[in-house]
Each structure stands twice: as C-alpha cells, then as structure tokens.
Image (cartoon, grey):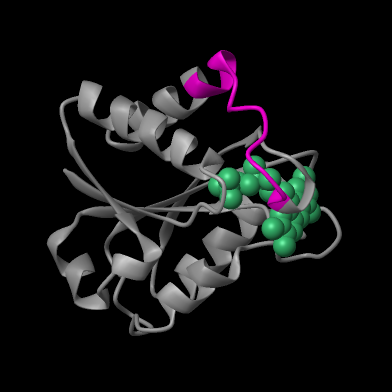
C-alpha cells in the first residue's frame, strides 16, 4: 500500500515524527511519500491507498481543535468524498500537552473529507511553547512509537 504523509512543521519536530512514521511504513514493506502542505495538490490523493496527516499541536491544550492553520488550508482543496475508501491516520507533537486533541481533530477533519477508517496515531513531546525556537527533539522512545504506528498502519 502506498501512503501519503502530509505534514506541516514550523520548527522541525513534526517532521521528526513524520520521518519515524515513514521509516516504520517502509520497514513493513510499503511505500511512503512525505509531502509538505505547501507542496500538496489535492488531486494527488487519488494515487494513494492511505493518508496520514501530521500537525504540530497549535492550541490543542486550550481549545477543542489544535491543528496548525497550514494543515487546515491544505485540506480546503479536497472534495468531501475524496478520502472515501482510504485508510487515514493522524500524528502530532506538542511542547507540553494537547497533542491528543490535535490527533482527534485530525480525524474529524479527515472524516469531513470522506474518511471512514481513521486510525489515530501517537502524540509526542518535543519543541518549546509557541515554537519560538527549535527545542528538544522527539525522544528515542517516542520515535519507536511512531515507527510502530507506521508499521501497524500498513499491516
Ligand atoms: C500557535 C501555536 C500554538 C501552540 N499551542 C501549543 C499547545 O496548546 N500545547 C503545547 O504543548 N504546545 C503548543 N505549541 C508548541 C508546539 O506544539 C511545539 O513547539 C511543537 O514541537 C512544534 O512542532 P513543529 O516543530 O513541527 O512546528 C504551539 C505552537 C504554536 C506556534
């Protein structure tokens, strides 16, 4: 199965999670393409069996949404049924807390585009509040969680 991992990352930490997830997918024998949201063309999803959205937690600790705006904008171009029949996932990173809210919200967004099979992934700690600068990386244990998630996603 070929998987699209669509991500935004201001200071690089979500990308760390994305790379680990892709490593897990590839180790399990599937293909993963990593696409930054600004390079995303909605028509491309037709070529994938699954899509994983990756967003840093933006206000997920204080609001019921928490997805980074560039990720929201990237989804605008998708038709409401464009993810029908596709396996979907979501992952996040946060500096303190709220990433689980982000992962939940990513599922709601994907459902709004026709996804009926959402598999929520990990949310891990990395970075600093408000992403003012590059902070601590995703830890080794969390990297393993993302790898395991990637492998399970394509099982
Ligand atoms: C607008 C904004 C809101 C944020 N809100 C939260 C939050 O609610 N909880 C939290 O733990 N971190 C929050 N952060 C910090 C990021 O989630 C954290 O720095 C993350 O590691 C950034 O990932 P990135 O390097 O992929 O952009 C916020 C950052 C920004 C820019």
Q: Is residue 96 visible?
A: yes
The quadrant of the image that shows the C terminus is top left
Give x and y (percent) for residue 121: 52, 40
Give how far across and how far down residue 18 sits, in percent. 41, 39
- Left or right of 56? Residue 155 is left
Spot occupied by residue 10 in the image (x, y as percentages of width and height): 55, 53
- Does residue 75 appear left or right of residue 94 in this picture? left
Q: Say which of 92 and 83 sits in front.
A: 92
Q: Which image quarter: residue 139?
A: top right
- Magenta stretch holds residue 142: yes
Q: Nearer the viewer, residue 127 or 102?
A: 127
> Looking at this rendering, what residue extends furthest in the front direction?
133
Whether 131 is drawn above or below 26: the answer is below
Horizontal arrangement in the rendering, residue 70 relative to residue 85 (left or right):
right
The residue segment tinted magenta is: 131-143
- Identify the residue shown where x is 51% and y is 52%: 9
42, above or below 107, in the image = below
Query: In the image, residue 52 lies at what x, y percent?
Result: 39, 51
> Is 119 in front, or is 21?
21
The answer to which quarter of the image holds residue 62 is bottom right
Q: Quadrant of the N terminus?
A: top left
């Amino acid at each position: 199965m070929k998987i699209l991992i669509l991500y935004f990352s201001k200071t690089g930490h979500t990308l760390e999670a994305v790379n680990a997830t892709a490593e897990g997918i590839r180790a399990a024998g599937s293909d993963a393409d990593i696409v930054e949201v600004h390079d995303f063309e909605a028509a491309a999803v037709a070529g994938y069996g699954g899509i994983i959205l990756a967003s840093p937690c933006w206000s997920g600790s204080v609001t019921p949404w928490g997805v980074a705006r560039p990720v929201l904008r990237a989804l605008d171009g998708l038709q409401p049924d464009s993810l029908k029949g596709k396996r979907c996932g979501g992952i996040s990173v946060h500096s303190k807390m709220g990433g689980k809210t982000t992962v939940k919200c990513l599922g709601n967004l994907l459902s709004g585009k026709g996804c009926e099979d959402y598999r929520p992934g990990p949310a891990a700690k990395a970075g600093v509040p408000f992403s003012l600068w590059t902070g601590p990386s995703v830890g080794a244990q969390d990297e393993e969680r993302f790898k395991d998630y990637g492998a399970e996603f394509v099982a």
